[in-house]
Image (tube, helix red, strand yellow):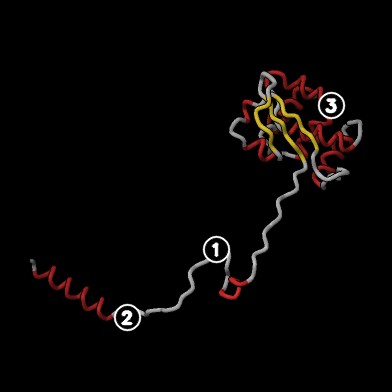
């Protein structure tokens, strides 16, 4: 063994023997959600399940149901999203239906643009417009929902939705 390697091993040994090790006894095991030892005895408060407000029955080109979801985010994130030819939106939340702030804002935009009907019905049309419309029949579908006012409401409710670019393009074409 070369002399240099022996010197390096000797120095490494001196360094290692000079290090001290502290032994800690009686340490509690790590527990998820516990910030300190006193919290371990307290029951954790679990978050309640979010209230399901809507049901989205997503259908394929042949009209057969593919899946039932409970939020716009689930519809947009679903792996079958591009296979949806139609989505039937139903309010299933607490009765009577009370619109949240975002829904009210979208309905107000739709009403200002000329939408007619009850606020809750307009909200359902806006949410449906935010889901997915089959590209070959999108113009017919959007006119069937109420046209420009509903599309403007949909873009207010979900400006970053996957369908938003298609809706924006459609608005430019009909304007």
Q: Residues within 10 Å of mark 2 (few under 14, many from 20)?
A: few
Q: Secondary structure at mark 1?
A: loop
Asked whether the beta carbons under mark 1 and mark 3 sit within 8 Å of each other, the answer is no
Query: Could you say which is closer to the camera, residue 88 or residue 156?
Result: 88
Residue labelled with disc 1? 32
Q: CA distance from mark 1 to mark 2?
A: 31 Å
* Residue at point 49%, 73% (across, down): 28
Measured Cα–Cα span from mark 2 to mark 3:
77 Å
Task: Find disc 3 in the rendering and name its residue.
Answer: 146
> Is residue 36 shown above or below 49?
below
Say which residue appears at 14% left-offset and 73% top-offset: 7
For label 1, the crowd category at 10 Å Cα-Cα, with few meaning under 14, some 14 to 19 and many 20 or more, is few
Q: Which quarter of the figure has residue 26?
A: bottom left
Q: Which residue is mark 2?
A: 20
Element assignment for label 3? loop
Task: Mark 1 or mark 2: name the one nearer the start of the chain.
Answer: 2
**Regarding mark 2 in the picture, which secondary structure is present there?**
loop
Residue 108, percent from left and from top: 87, 40
Q: Residue at x 66, y 39 (%)?
A: 74
Residue 141 or 98: which is nearer the viewer? Answer: 98
Q: Position of residue 44 (x, y in %)?
A: 64, 64
């Amino acid at each position: 063994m070369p002399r240099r390697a022996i010197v390096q091993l000797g120095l490494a040994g001196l360094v290692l023997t000079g290090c001290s090790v502290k032994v800690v006894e009686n340490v509690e095991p790590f527990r998820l959600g516990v910030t300190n030892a006193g919290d371990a005895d307290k029951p954790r408060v679990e978050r309640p399940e979010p209230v399901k407000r809507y049901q989205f029955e997503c259908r394929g080109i042949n009209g057969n149901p593919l899946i039932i979801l409970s939020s716009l985010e689930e519809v947009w994130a679903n792996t079958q999203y591009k296979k949806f030819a139609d989505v039937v939106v139903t309010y299933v939340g607490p009765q009577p239906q009370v619109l949240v702030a975002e829904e009210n804002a979208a309905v107000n935009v739709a009403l200002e643009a000329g939408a007619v009907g009850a606020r809750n019905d307009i909200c359902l049309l806006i949410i449906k417009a935010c889901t997915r419309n089959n590209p070959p029949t999108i113009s017919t579908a959007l006119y069937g929902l109420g046209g420009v006012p509903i599309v403007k409401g949909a873009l207010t409710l979900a400006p970053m939705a996957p369908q938003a670019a298609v809706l924006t393009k459609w608005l430019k074409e009909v304007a």
